[in-house]
């Protein structure tokens, strides 16, 4: 019975961690390109499926398309994305250089991380509310006893606390990564 609510909480945590991979920390991370779609013969295709993405240095990503004709499309897709990066086209590949983050930008990112963490906590607490409502309905319908309902509520609260702690530690870890020069 509790499994479905725990799965939802786990999904909220996974979603937060996925959002964190898209926040760049001044180092080249190929995961920030996950949402970039390239127009590949009329259909939007993930960037990783039209070329090889490599990280030769800490602040550089090189994208080598499998077809030279895709260079312009990849360049256009990166420019249209919200990454804030300017692609350099050398005729064979696209080079993305990651500038050092300024102190001001680091603080903005830290605020954004904190906001995303708060949103994840709210989502987890909403799941707790849904679970408690579910058990109250079962109690009213005489499907479970008062003791069982109380026991389930306690278990849901413990589960909520566990996932809120996981969100906080993920948020702190990402903030520390961002603030490290």
Image (cartoon, rainbow, N blue to C red):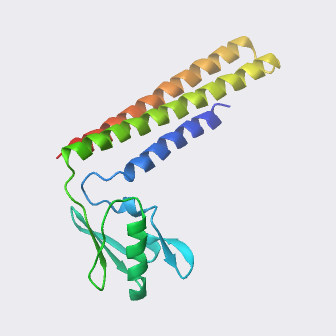
Please tell me how many numbered marks the rendered image carries.
Answer: 0
Q: Residue at x 30, y 85 (%)?
A: 92
Depth check: 108 or 125 in front? Answer: 108
Would you identify the image quadrant in which residue 85 lies? bottom left
Q: Is residue 151 above or below residue 102?
A: above
Left or right relative to 169: residue 44: right
| Residue 19 in the figure: left or right of residue 144 | left
| Displayed quadrant of residue 96 | bottom left
* Residue 94: % across, % down: 31, 76
The image quadrant that residue 30 belongs to is: bottom left
- Asked if one can make out residue 128 in the rendered structure from this viewpoint, the answer is yes
Q: Name the foreground residue: 144 vs 73.
A: 73
The residue lying at 44 percent from left, 32 percent from top is 118
Which residue is located at x 19 percent, y 44 percent?
103
Report the residue at 22% width, 42% height from top: 179
Task: State the quadrant of the N terminus.
Answer: top right
Q: Relative to 122, does residue 78 appear above or below in the rendering? A: below
| Residue 51 seen | no
Is residue 46 positioned above or below 109 on the image? below
Q: Farthest residue in the left direction?
A: 181
Taking the image as shown, residue 165 lies to the left or right of residue 107, namely right
In the rendered image, the residue lying farthest to the top is 146
Residue 61 percent across, percent down from the top left: 28, 68
Please state the horizontal and vertical placement of residue 132, each as a whole percent of the image.
Answer: 65, 22
| Residue 139, horizontal then vertical, whole percent | 76, 17
């Amino acid at each position: 019975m509790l499994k479905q609510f725990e799965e939802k909480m786990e999904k909220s945590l996974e979603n937060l961690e996925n959002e964190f991979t898209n926040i760049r920390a001044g180092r080249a991370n190929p995961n920030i390109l996950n949402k970039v779609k390239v127009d590949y013969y009329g259909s939007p295709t993930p960037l990783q499926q039209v070329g090889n993405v490599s990280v030769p240095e800490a602040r550089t990503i090189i994208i080598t398309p499998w077809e030279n004709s895709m260079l312009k499309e990849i360049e256009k897709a990166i420019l249209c994305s919200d990454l804030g990066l300017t692609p350099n086209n050398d005729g064979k590949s696209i080079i993305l250089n990651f500038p050092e983050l300024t102190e001001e930008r680091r603080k903005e990112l830290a605020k954004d991380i904190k906001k995303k963490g708060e949103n994840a906590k709210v989502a987890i607490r909403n799941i707790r509310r849904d679970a408690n409502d579910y058990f109250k309905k079962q109690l009213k319908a005489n499907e479970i006893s008062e003791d069982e309902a109380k026991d389930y509520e306690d278990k849901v609260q413990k589960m909520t606390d566990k996932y809120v702690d996981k969100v906080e530690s993920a948020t702190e870890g990402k903030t520390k990564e961002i603030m490290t020069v």
